[in-house]
Amino acid sequence: MQYERWSPLYDAIRREFGFSWPPEERAAARLRALLPEAARAQPLERLGRRLRGRAVVVVGLAPGAGPPPLWRRPFSAEPAALVAADGATATCLDAGLVPDVVATDLDGPVPSEVTANRRGALVVVHAHGDNVPLLEEWVPEFPGELVGSWAGPPGEGLIDPGGFTDGDRAAYLAEAAGASRLLLWGFEFDRTDEVEPEARARKLAKLAWADRALSALAAASSIPIERWHRDGSRTDYKAAGISGASTR
């Protein structure tokens, strides 16, 4: 999805959660400074070399989902690429699966992401207004290929193909990199492991926006986007346009 189509949806998200723009810009500037020069060069092209023309399984971290059962092979005979969203990286590694790409804002089990990066995964590190300390702690620890992203206009070595949470942002990344189809595993929007009521309510509100973001992607994209359910069934992602994004 083009940034111009995505940005109105993110503006609505910022209004709901009270995200201030200057901290986003400061985080992006810090990420640019921390990334090696090679990580700022041709980011989408490098993602495309891994994902273009391939079926992509995007792995989320819905409670109890576990790793994707790739042996069921609900796609062509060609092996699918794996894009893991943050904490789902550990789930993949535990099952002996090394993701092709990891999308993370560094608030999950980052050592597993460093391990995946060492084993060949490209890690897309996302900067946002309150993760500068995590950027400073962890970006220098990654030994392999990196890409940087943020929530503003793409340029100066950082991308923004769209997406809000790690899960839906992983799907947006794969679509922007030229995937031939997306299969979303471990995506649920009405359950969370959060126990504390305020944190639970905030998490569910974010998941609701993730669902809407994916619906907008399905409406804008020319490729099939499906949810892969635990019983093995697949359903087309419901498509909804961005118009009216600021309503609940």
Image (cartoon, rainbow, N blue to C red):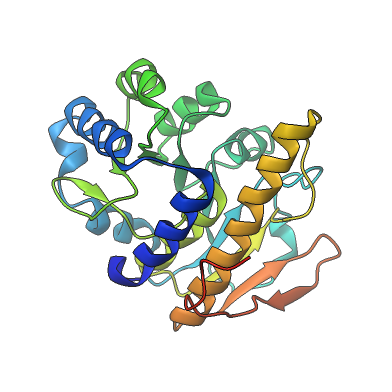
Q: Nearer the viewer, residue 189 or 15?
A: 15
Q: Position of residue 186 (x, y in %)?
A: 70, 53
Q: Could you tell me if residue 79 is visible in this image? A: no
Q: Could you tell me if residue 246 is visible in this image? A: yes
Residue 165 relative to residue 3: left or right: right
> Which residue reaches farthest right?
231
Q: Nearer the viewer, residue 139 or 45?
A: 139
Q: Quarter holding the N terminus? A: bottom left
Q: Residue at x 67, y 42 (%)?
A: 203
In this rendering, the answer to whether 244 lies above or below 153 is below
Q: Position of residue 34 (x, y in %)?
A: 22, 25
> Which residue reaches farthest bottom?
222
In the picture, residue 138 is in which quadrant?
top left
Q: Residue at x 17, y 27 (%)?
A: 33
Q: Quarter holding the C terminus? A: bottom right
Residue 108 relative to residue 105: left or right: right
Residue 238 relative to residue 157: left or right: right
Q: Position of residue 227 (x, y in %)?
A: 68, 68
Q: Residue at x 49, y 30 (%)?
A: 113
User: How many labels sit on residues?
Assistant: 0
In this rendering, the answer to whether 206 lies above or below 108 is below
In this rendering, the answer to whether 46 lies above or below 4 is above
Q: Nearer the viewer, residue 154 or 15?
A: 15
Q: Position of residue 211 (x, y in %)?
A: 62, 62
In this rendering, the answer to whether 183 lies above or below 241 is above
Q: Residue at x 69, y 38 (%)?
A: 95
